[in-house]
Amino acid sequence: MGIFSKLAEWLGVKRKECNIVVVGLDNSGKTTILNKLKPDDSQTSDIVPTIGFNVENFSSKSLQFNAFDMSGQGRYRNLWEHYYKDCQGVIFVIDSADKLRMPVAKDELDQLIQHPDLVSKRVPVLFFANKMDHRDALSSVKCSTLLKLDEISNKPWHICASNAITGEGLDEGVNWLSDQIKSYLRDLERRRR
Amino acid sequence: MAEITSREESKGYQDYEGNKKWLNAHYDPLASLYTFSQCIALSDINADGENKLIIADLGTGTYDMKLKVYRGTSLMSENAIIDLPTGVVTFYMDLTEPRTPAIAVASGSFIYIYKNLRPYFKFTLPSLPIDEKEESAWIQAKDDLIDVSVLREILDGLRSKGVILTVRSMKFLRLPPHELSTFVTLHKNSPLKMQTVVTCLETLKKSHSEDDAISCLVLGTEHLAIYILDPEAFTILTKIDIPAVPVFLSVNGLYDVDYRIVVACRNGAVYSLKRGSEVKKPVFQLSAQPVGLQRIGKNIVVACMDQTLQCYSTKGNKLWLIRMPADILTMEAMEDKQKGFKGVLVGIENHEVHVYRDKYLVNVIKTEDAVTGIKFGKFGREDSTLVMTTKGGSLLIKMLKRTAKFEEKDATTSSGPPASQQQKLNVPKKTKLFVDQTLRERNNCVVMHQQFQHDLYRIRLEAARNYAESLNKSLNPISTNPQEPLKLSVHVNGIGPMFKLIVQLQNTSLNSPSVGLFLTFHFDSSLYSVEKTLIPVPFLVPGLNYTFESYVECKSDKGISDTIKAYLCRRSSSTPIITGIINMPVSESIIVS
């Protein structure tokens, strides 16, 4: 990092960069959420099932995010773990209308939490209980009990109900995530010194 | 709330090793679904990317039959069915967009077709010819020419002759005497019809093999026929007669190209039908009635009522047989394309579901109740979902974990051939001599066989001659004459030159004693000298052993030996009754000196 970029960062002109992975079962709305988080002029109108993964960039008020939008289909889920190593945050998207597959989501979450690349890190995990507008959607509280989120002890986590189509609830979640990532990065730097 | 408590109840089963490969997605003990595997289907009937669970519920068996559709964990729709359902399939019947498959429910002698969960069409099986005598009997009853007891007698007579009667006649014969006349007055004016009943239902792709290609319906009936129906006009494309009542079907191929239908019948015979071929004899006959039939690759796997799971090749050779710990209730194929897994799921009476890959048990799922209906496939958006219904009417939905692996390690510990059987034996190469010999034998087989037969006859002739001679001369030690039931045996003791002959005599009759007999020896006097050449035999009591002894001296020192014959004779006759031939051993004295 050159002296100018450091200066720019300190002055708040250039934002700090961080990598996050966006995971969740297929059809939960990961791509739609990221699409909504992008600036208005670069949003697309048609969302298709992701194959493999996409890299999306978006920014909050203080951070520049490199988001790995992973495919949620069963056959691509084994790709997720390869991106855990150098990520500073995780977004886990839940389809709150798909009550049947909650145990599958829980199984995938357990594998994520216990993965060797993440188990000892205090990486913040943000949950979106997506499709809150859906008629038989579960509440965010119900989602967190079904996924047993209260049993996650070594990572900061937050759940918020969202609607990716209207963008409801997304900002709240992203703000929480950027605060957490900043403190996490600060923590890392302090330890390095 | 009920769901949460039930999940906690099932915790004990969660700890079980085999259940850890599965995620418990849903458990509803109060679903009151009474059904079996043929009446369960998974299909995307709304064309929205989510598969629904379609179940024909048998209700109590007499009423409350319903077609239920589940979307996720909740019941989406219910349709009443009039008669007992025997099969449910979904199939694409046209190419109109959006591609929504139709549901076909077999019930009684009808196939009900539903589209978008609304009744769409009812197919009625063609009525069959009625027995003439039965028809005339009913006509006479209608015109009051015969009374009910005579009608009953006629119908009973026809039934005992093996005539297949109409449903009305069978109901009539079942009634108690005082209800007969009311039954006849109620029904006599409606025309008599012979209706058959659908026993099993399957689908067969018509001309393309894609997942969403148009399919024909294949159905088996109680009156020994298989029908293939056109999916658009519901006309009968093909009718195949088979010798027994079909109960399970397994269909492969395309109707327009080539297809094969494997049919398991109620009497345990399994037939294989091909396009354009006649049915003659079963491919194989099972030891007991079938409870399930699946084709896994090229093999046919059948579950039987004698607690066995059997596998046959398409040609009918039995490949393997496994015994189950309890009665088999149902069987279903399990195919996971992502994992490349193909196997069968077997629901057993002892509250277990076994997963077999080939003949190896790879997983055991324990449930709270005996499983009667199993379906494996895509439900909702999850590809490998296991849907089970139990005897008590509960509904279980389990999903295979992404990380679950079915290892073959169970296979080596459980049944199957031991590992040593797989080792190659060090068989030496064929020698030139062996090859030459084989070639010679192959070229001269006729001559060799003739020679062998010739020699065999010679041996038999020789044996017969000797036997006849010995009978004539009484040369054998057991008497063949029923008047003289005697047995003689001789031993030689000693090493020479002095030997001791021990002769044992026995009267083998039950209660007739022998008198007036004597023993004598015949020998070469230049070689041997016998101490007692004549031994008078006393009164022989039946059953007792008499022992006589005599010393024999060998006179020669040349190391040669001869035979000595012992005769048992009667004073009045010159031919002996029985003869003992003694092969004398070589005198040892020569060796000593």
Image: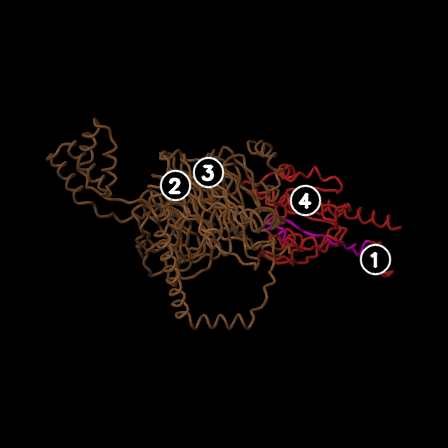
Q: Are marks 2 and 4 on the same chain?
A: no
- Any magenta on residue B468? no
Label 3 to label 1: alpha-carbon separation: 131 Å
User: In the image, which disc is placed on residue A110?
Assistant: 4
Query: Quick one: label 1 or label 4, which is nearer the N terminus?
Result: 1
Which chain can be seen in red?
Answer: A
Between marks 1 and 4, how big is the CA–CA gap? 40 Å
Query: Circle 3 sits in a helix, a strand or a loop, which is it?
Result: strand
Between B420 and B24, which is closer to the camera in this rendering? B420
B132 or A4: which is nearer to us?
A: B132
Find the distance from the CA under tag 4 to the CA under tag 3: 95 Å
The residue where tag 3 is placed is B546
Label 4: element kind: helix
Mark 3 residue type? Tyr
Q: Secondary structure at mark 1?
A: helix
Could you tell me how far apart the alpha carbons at marks 2 and 3 are, in whole angstroms?
13 Å
Image position of A191 (left or right of B160): right
Question: Label 4 amino acid?
Answer: Asp
Disc 2 residue type? Answer: Leu
* Mark 1 vs mark 2: in front: 2
Magenta range:
A12-32
Chain B color in figure: brown
Q: Position of residue B150 (x, y in %)?
A: 15, 33
Could you give the CA–CA distance between mark 2 and mark 4, rounded to whole angstroms? Answer: 104 Å
Q: Which residue is mark 2?
A: B517
Tag nearer the camera, 2 or 4? 2
Residue at the top extreme, as displayed: B178
